[in-house]
Image: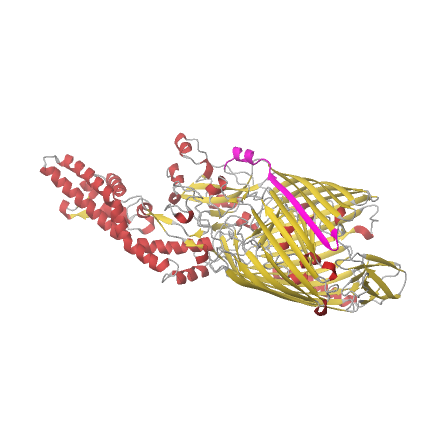
Amino acid sequence: MYPNFTQKVSCFVVILLLYSGFAFCQTSISGKVVEASTNEPLTGVSVQVKNKIIGTITNAEGNFNLATTSLPPFTLVVSSVGFETQEINITGGISNIEVKLVEQAILGKELIVSASRVEESVMRSPVSIEKIDIRTIRETPQASFYDALQNLKGVEMSTQSLTFKSVSTRGFGANGNTRVVQLIDGMDNQAPGLNFSVGNVAGIPELDVESVEILPGAASALYGPNAINGIILMNSKSPFTYQGLSAYGKSGVMSASNRTKTNTPFYDMGIRYAKAFNNRLAFKVNASYLTAKDWQATDYRDQSLVNGTSLENNNNNVLNNPYYDGVNRLGDVGANVYNVLYANGIPGTGANGTSAALGAIYSTQIPQAGNLTLPQLLGGQTPLQQLDIARSIFSKVVPQYYLNAPGYAENALTNYPAKSLKLNASLHYRLNDNVEAILQANWGKGSAVYTGADRYNIQNFSIGQYKAEVKGSNFFVRAYMTRENSGDAYAMGVLGSLVSQSYLQTALGAGLPSFLNTALTQYGGALLQAYQAGLAGGLSQQQAIQAASAAANAYAGANNTQWLTTALAPGIATANQQYLPGGTQFESTVSDIKTKPIPNGAKFLDKSNLYHAEGMYNFTKLINPRVIELIAGANYRIYDLNSGGTLFETQDGTPTGKEFNIKEYGAYTQASKSFGDVFKLTASVRYDKNMNFKGQFSPRISGVYTVAKNHNFRASFQRGFRIPTTQNQYINLLTPSVRLVGGLPLFREKYNMVGNAVYEQTAITSSSLQDGSLKPYKFREWQPERVQTYEVGYKGVIRNKLYIDAFYYYNRFLTFDGVTVLLQRKDSNGPLTDLLDPTKRNTYSMPVNATQTVKNSGWGVGLDYVLGKGYTFNGNLTQNILNNNAELLKNDPSFVTFFNSPKYRFNLGFSNRDINRTGWGFGITFRHQSSMVWQASVASVAANVQQKTVIPAYSTLDAQISRKITSIKSIVKIGGTNLTGKLYTTGWANPSVGAMYYVSITFDELLN
């Protein structure tokens, strides 16, 4: 039924098209738009009827013609990026209007929609808002518009790949941030199985970007679940307003000293074409492609923090820690020979978990001793006595010896492809001056590496989004679906572990039987020799047996490690020849594992879908907005999970069963009242319901007080919430270190967490085991995360030269969503000390709510100053702090907040886009952030809990120079990022980012 979702809506749009027809044009207007200081014609200027859909653009000579059914009087709005907008009153059909646009610096002049879902001045926004537009994108020294977002106040960016970067605001940064919602033309750009957008890997082509608005902080009151820490609205260009052909080519060098090859090229290109017919029908098509060799992650410090090791003293395991856990060394697992041979402790053949070694000790007859077994020879009369003696002999013969596989540097398991192919197209039809119908398709495919609970290589990952929409000046109705395909993605940690298992099997396979044969022969020989010597020395038979047992035990204890290492040496040599990088079996084994789905391989399967419908209506035409401006909206959403049983739990609990669908719906209303031009009061409320959780209300109230036109003071309160992600609800994934399970009650039942109790890892200590104070974990109701946000701020323009934007916020997370690690004995009847042995316990990572309130706050200030003659300076500084971190750790040492934000961060910029009207321009950006603790699910539990996962402070310098060549309607840009070349990393286990140097040329038929 779901694939027909957008088809039905598309049919509705087509019916509207068929029955609309072309309305008879009542008014015709024509004219010309020129640049005020030079009288040169301006191309591509928007000419639109105010508060209507209908409009047109100027041609290459600056001329325009507009036919509208709107009856005079009405107002024409003439606008272009970088020029002051003009409004012209029309009283009848007019020809030969001449409009002169004046170039201006944009200081508080932008219009935004994200703050209140209605168009308003950024100066009077009730909450913090950041925006970049076409001019900003042209001027930025960053290699892409998405990278330029990190220049904005309060915006942080985690770089996991050249093509995959995650935006965070106001703390709680993440690789793949589920707290920030990214919308492209109103469509939630998240991958349904991941619940976060994959940066701009499958996003919007740069040539089609009109603007990007970022709303830091909670936005749930209008945008619903998950917009708890911010929302990103990416708006594409209308084919009515931005017509013609545009294209770009960009190439350069990526340089980082830690990479396999320090300097490698990258290539980025794109093309866009749009055409309108009679200002009624229009279409656009876009394509862009990027390819490069990505940044590499090469941190080999030991995060196990055991056996006297630390992050500082055991880089690349120079101390030979058998439990070494390198940050970016994968598959560094091992096997305790004692545990391998002991198995379940029951003598047998090795089948069904029995111990073949104990079986040999228990049942092998000794001809020299009258065919008695060793346990019988040592006095075992009953089977139980003989079993105890066999286990005792085993403990003397077999040493506690840990053989660890060497593991694999991350760059041995991937060649770091960075690719991004984006294709999109849309068809637009204006039914009349007020209503426009749109059919749109966005499709992207890419390759990148990202950091989650593992390091994932997402090769040939794709997302398709398909939308049908009808919108007017005061409403919209849209429906879309998102189809995700994980392609050839695989988990590199799982891959490394499975290759290491092949290594260990080869290393141990022939050696362990040889060792057992040697050990038992030597033990038995020593026992008989000492027994005979005792009898010859006059000892009684019982005394001789006891003396012989002691002698044999001492002999085995002194020599068992040598016997084992000698027996294993040939197998280890073979394993090295076969499974180390470059070995005879390495490439074929890696290739085989990459093609097999988890848990038998490393392939990550996910073809989850999302279906969404929503609408909004502004009552402006029914209620005078001077009295009150009222809007209302609603949405319905379905997540259709489909990971082939590799990622999500199934309804029947089997790997081949059908996975779950998750249904959500919500509705909201907002009312605003302006009291002259002095004060504006806005209040909104939203209700949302997810099938697995109770309904949630999200209110917001705000006020903006304006003084002397250009000074605006604001205050707001709102409550946001975040419904747990699809993974937090239904994930069931075994990683190299832990099994990730969802927080829903079904997992407690599936893994018998009540019948066979689980215990919080941090509560398990030697003392708690000895004194009996260790108690089973008590499960609580798991709820959506809720936050209360208070914010005050100021926006002002002084003498049309200086723009100031400042804010302070305070958050209280009432049901903070965190993670706890639970341990469970594999043998429910085993001793509690089994919880200390990784081979005798199950380890689960499960989302839970904090039992206490999490508080954070911060402030920021941004300045833009016009120096004159086109020179501008800008800077911003932000602070984010976790207010009660010490209290949280004192009350619950196991709780991890994942706050992941630097205390201080600032940006400085200096630019001129057209120096003395020569066409030359430049831009310089300096960025710095302080050090921070970055807690991550890929980090070891010890490193997270002890807050050892520190990301050092770093600074970057980016710059570009450009030349506008009007004769060929092109801009040539030469630039570079991180020009100092000093490597930096933005998150735990993330790659080290180096320098980029590039040259680009952009052609735009509408370039003025």
Q: Left of 883 or right of it: where is 532?
A: left
- From the viewer's side, name the closer residue of 265 and 450: 265
Q: Position of residue 64 (x, y in %)?
A: 81, 67
Q: Position of residue 809 (x, y in %)?
A: 67, 40
Who is closer to the viewer here, 535 or 973?
A: 973
Q: How is the image coloured?
A: secondary structure
Q: Left or right: 568 with respect to 930?
A: left
Read off the magenta span: 867-893
Q: Visible in this render: residue 251? A: yes
Q: In terms of image quadrants, where is residue 587? A: bottom left
Quadrant where the C terminus lies?
A: bottom right
> In the image, is residue 494 above or below residue 526?
below
Q: Is residue 576 magenta?
A: no
> Which residue ends up furthest to the right in the rendered image?
91
Quarter of the image with the N terminus is bottom right
Q: Give the number of callouts.
A: 0
Residue furthest out toward the top: 771
User: Quick check: 491 left or right of 431?
Assistant: left
**Does the magenta run of residues contain 872?**
yes
For the residue pair 902 and 525, the one nearer the viewer reads as 902
**Closer to us: 442 or 690:** 442
Any part of residue 760 in sight: no
Q: Position of residue 665 (x, y in %)?
A: 65, 50
Quarter occupied by residue 475: bottom right
Relative to residue 901, is residue 660 depicted above or below? Answer: below
Report x, y in % for residue 627.
84, 45
For the point 44% across and 31% down, which residue is it?
A: 773
In the displayed structure, would residue 914 be above or below residue 878? Answer: below
